[in-house]
Amino acid sequence: MLDPNLIRTKTEFVKKGIANKGVDASIVDEFLKVDEKRKGMIKEIDELRHKRKVLSEEIGKRIANGKDTEETKEEVRNIGKQIKEKEKDFNELNRQFKNILLRIPNIPHSSVPYGKNEIDNRVVKRWGDIKDFDFEPRPHWEIAEKLGIIDFKRAAKISGARFYVLKGMGAKLERALISWMIDLHVEKHGYKEIFPPFLINRDSMIGTGQLPKFEDDMYHCGKDDLFLDPTAEVPVTNLHRDEILKEEDLPIKYVAYTACFRREAGAAGKDTRGIIRVHQFNKVEMVRFVKPEESYKQLEELIDNAEDVLRLLNIPYQLKQMCTGDLGFTAAMKFDPEAYMPAQDRYVEISSCSNFEDFQARRANIRYRTKSGELRYVHTLNGSGLAVGRTMAAILENYQQKDGSVLIPEVLQKYVGTDRITAEN
RNA sequence: GGAGAGAUGGCUGAGUGGUUGAAAGCGCCUGACUCGAAAUCAGGUAGAAGGGUUUCCUUCUCGUGGGUUCAAAUCCCACUCUCUCCGCCA
């Protein structure tokens, strides 16, 4: 959520930022209209309440002095009725006010290159040597099915399309990746491990910005009004919702594994094969709560933490900066590390690292007290470190051998317990 | 799921209808003392919204939402959460 005062005082700046994201900026005018009305009503109601308060106190004094109070009581009763009526209108207006505010996207950082959509994103960095295969590299789903470590057919039987079952060394590799990534971020990068709930309430989903706009993309348990987390960002960021943190505790760095659930509404026909785009996947996520003045330095660190995973796995990757039009609803700046996939000869998003500035902090009411006693909103950041399923796919494709077996990256060998996956093991 | 107890400021914890937005303690901030620190003493210290804008005014907030009343932290109802006991269960 944006600072209402920023919208009021720097209207054109805000509109331009929103427009640069490709969002209709007329929502700002809608906001200003409701805002004016709302302010007027607050004034009216405040004055009435003030009158009531003064008169009520008067009645108290009169009773103490044994004087008559009936006339004043009648007057206050009337004021009470007026207040109640106005409050009804105000509540409706205030609901609108909040709703509009929750639907206005974050505005891009001034340094983010302008662009309409993903086509305008820029590659800012490439790392690693793409292997020269002396055979035609196969896509990960073929490799995996041949090795018997992924089963799409039975997943469809159990759950439906866009699900998969891991078996044997496939399951073990998935589990190994999760453990290794978390250990890496805890031991080398200084994060604290969190294991949060996967079912999330409405307030938390609003806090990080999934609701109210993207309810259709979420799995929802109607009976309990709980949502399946689409990313660990949600539970982990909301860990400190409605809290006041201490300046000396910042930055706070958390790493969490969760399963992630996405309906992928609107992605029909995209990445239909393999495990790139599925309804349930595993992800290790890094989250940071930081002081505003250092959030962009923190973003660089976060990105490097994600890249480190790829470097240690020795998977060639590129880093892409999202243009204004591809930042999404909540981010002010975003970089996506992308892993090279030999079979398709393309780079696939394997992480996404964002600075939300105070956008989420305002929604979730996460503040810190400075040493001088001032209250300020923190900046929140997060990034995948990494998407586990896609990492597995990248390993399968980059480490595949002519005979169909797959080598295990050295850093993972002690977690997997072998240096190679074959059809036999 | 059943029965009971509870939810108050950054924290602990008083407060059962009328200047109580809230005692006390802790913590924190400022000042004094000190070479400096600790201890001690004095003072200050909730948040949000709206208005005025150099220290100002008003309103709201004691889990959430309703209700009673001239007036609610305080009484009533519903809900949420926490704790204890029972049931069920991995």
Image (cartoon, coloured by chain):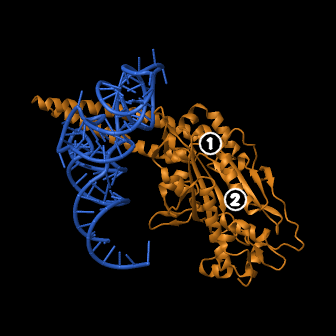
Coordinates of residue B7 in the picture (x, y in percent): 31, 50
Residue at disc 2, secondary structure: helix
Determine which quarter of the picture holds residue A345.
bottom right
Query: What colour do you see for chain B?
Result: blue
Residue at disc 1, secondary structure: helix
Q: Nearer the viewer, mark 1 or mark 2?
A: 2
Q: Is A244 on the left-hand or right-hand side of A294?
A: left
Circle 2 is placed at which residue position?
A: A309
Q: Residue furthest right?
A: A134
Front position in the image: A193 or B59: A193
Name the amino acid type tagged 2: Val
Coordinates of residue A273 in the picture (x, y in percent): 74, 72
Circle 1 is placed at which residue position?
A: A295
Front position in the image: A142 or A225: A142
Q: Is A173 on the left-hand or right-hand side of B76?
A: right
Q: Is A294 on the left-hand or right-hand side of A421?
A: left
Name the amino acid type tagged 1: Ser
Residue A92 against residue A411 in the figure, above or below: above
Task: Compute the Cα span from label 1 to label 2.
Answer: 22 Å
Query: What colour do you see for chain A?
Result: orange
Circle 1 residues within 10 Å: few <14, some 14–19, many ≥20: many
Residue A17 against residue A411 in the figure, above or below: above
Determine which quarter of the picture holds residue A418.
bottom right
Circle 2 residues within 10 Å: few <14, some 14–19, many ≥20: some
Q: Chain of mark 1?
A: A
